[in-house]
Amino acid sequence: MTTTKELLRSVYGYDSFREGQEAIIDSVLLGKRTLGIMPTGGGKSLTYQLPAMLLPGTTMVVSPLISLMKNQVDELVAAGVPATMINSGVTVDEIKKRLTDIKNGVYKLFFIAPERLEDPYFYRFIQALPLSLVVIDEVHVLSQWGHDFRPSYLASVDLIENLSNKPNVMALTATATQKVQADLINILAIENTVKTGFARDNLAIKIEKGLSQQEKFDFVIAYAKNNPDDIGIIYAGTRKLVDETSELLVKSGISARAYHAGMLDHEREAAQDAFLYDECQVMVATNAFGMGINKTNVRYIIHLSMPGSIEAYYQEIGRAGRDGLPSETVLLASARDAQLQRFFIDNADNQTPAYRQRELAKLQEMTGFTATQNCLQQYIVQYFGEQIPPCGICSNCTDTRELLDMTLAAQKVLSNIVRMGQLQAGNYSKTQVVAVLRGKLAEKMRWTGFDTLSTYGLLSDWPVKKLNQFIDYLAADGFLLVSGEYNGLRISDKGICVLKSEQSVMMREIKTTQPIKKTRSQNCEIGGDLFELLRKQRSMFAKELSLPPFMIFSDQV
Ligand code: ADP
Ligand code: MG
Ligand code: ZN
């Protein structure tokens, strides 16, 4: 009998398994319902492809995106593994032919989108197959706690559960917090979970703060020019910025392509192919690009603004260095980023209070990432419930600026927050806390009596911006807790230790934001016309993909 190791060598040409792969494969071959959690680029595809080759019947892979399927099928066929896909991009005649071939056992694997299961004809068809295994890839979208929750995917779970030929089920993802994991185990009746570390040791994660839009453009142009032999992806928050950035790059003599959901199908495909086949150096894209794309030699990812959650960010930076070689990610963060993400949440269609609360909590975690002075890699894996030592290569680990003792200032801020809550029960927003600390309580807030507190005006000599950033830092590093609709602040246990002088607050000087230079793109305020435009584009895009509009809220401008 062929062993998995032999197949690994003969089909893929690899000598050894990566962490987690063998455990997942063995579990599936033993017939256990398995959940595999491995980092992006960790090698999840192989963990269902090998069992598919060894199991007696056929394997069906349920995959959320067409681009993802195409990529996987092309790779399998190239490796000599018979595989195909059934999706809306294929003609009816061709689908008939492929189904006949599947029935005749020509293929070991076939890929479908979840919606396909709702077609009664297709459903009867697969029930008549010797179906050994159903694979659910990118399974985090099944959990409402996950990134990119897709309720439509849930319907497919019931259909899979009810299959009369009772295939085994395996599910894969890179981004599962503890909550998502528990959810998935429950929804899919998982018997065995295999999880490897979330850390991506070969990624040097960096954050640059305080650049104006023009300076961000200059940054990416210089970066691409200084690394002419490297391939990179630049993520922009809006379609308009994608077009603008790629044009600027091209004008500077860099071969760049653009990719976003506002482009025609064939344009997008051409851009993606150019990137996959090394015909361009830089891909400028919205978050519509990249899921499941297996391009191993991406050397850098630059974010022109902050994404809405750690999950989204982790997925996106995960596309660098899939070959394991040193790669770099740079987040060009600015204070406005959170406002834009907040706008997307506030204006998402079909939102429930629970949805809103979850998204705001995720945004808060992401904002914390840009404010923390601890290891960035550590911050990310901690979010997924794992502890690691500092990575040593992120921009915080390598920051050589002097550490300052900020304990006294922290005590002022923290005791003020406690006092405000004692005087008028409640958690107060950063704006309100800053107003009291600076001794600038608004007339309409006088009823609170906050201006009578001993902490009133205690930091009146601090500029608003500095105080805001300091509070962000205290929240990011866990001295303060942030919750609720208005991001109310509360002191944590760690913060109490600071008040009791049992713990000090050491931090590096906060980089003060440079004065914002006026550039064309900064004149555009969100509101009025732009608001309308956003709404229109969102529903148009949603229609294209037949998704509920809120699923795709971050690629819409
Ligand atoms: P993901 O976990 O993100 O789905 P993939 O399955 O696409 O990752 O794999 C990422 C890359 O790692 C691919 O290029 C794949 O060929 C490679 N890879 C997977 N397993 C191994 C292995 N055992 N040895 C070397 N490279 C591997
Ligand atoms: Mg994958
Ligand atoms: Zn680090």
Image (spheres, helix red, strand yellow):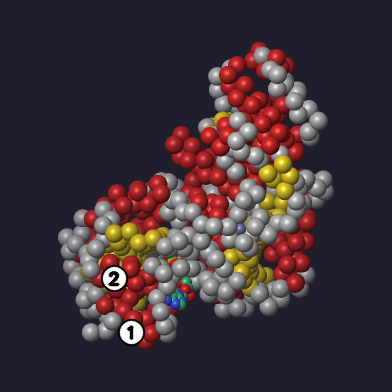
- In this picture, residue 334 sits left or right of residue 287: right
Give the secondary structure at mark 1.
helix
Going by the numbered disc 1, the residue's amino acid type is: Glu
Residue 26's label in the rendered image is 2
Residue 254's place in the image compared with 151, above or below, is below
Q: Residue 123's mark?
A: none
Instruction: Give SS at disc 2.
Output: helix
For this view, does 460 lie left or right of residue 326?
right
Give neighbour class at mark 2: few <14, some 14-19, many 20+ (Cα, 10 Å). Answer: some
Residue drawn at x 24%, y 63% is: 32
Residue 297: % across, % down:
57, 75
Up/down of 147 relative to 457, above or below = below
Which residue position holds label 1? 6
Residue located at (50% from left, 51% from top)? 382
Number of other residues with Cα within 10 Å of mark 1, as a class: few under 14, some 14 to 19, many 20 or more:
some
Rendered location of residue 77, percent (x, y): 39, 81
Residue type for callout 2: Asp
Above or below, comparing residue 54 to residue 210 in the picture:
below
- In this view, the residue farthest toward the bottom is 10
Q: What residue sits 38% from the left and 67% below the top? A: 20
- Which of marks 1 and 2 precedes in the sequence? 1
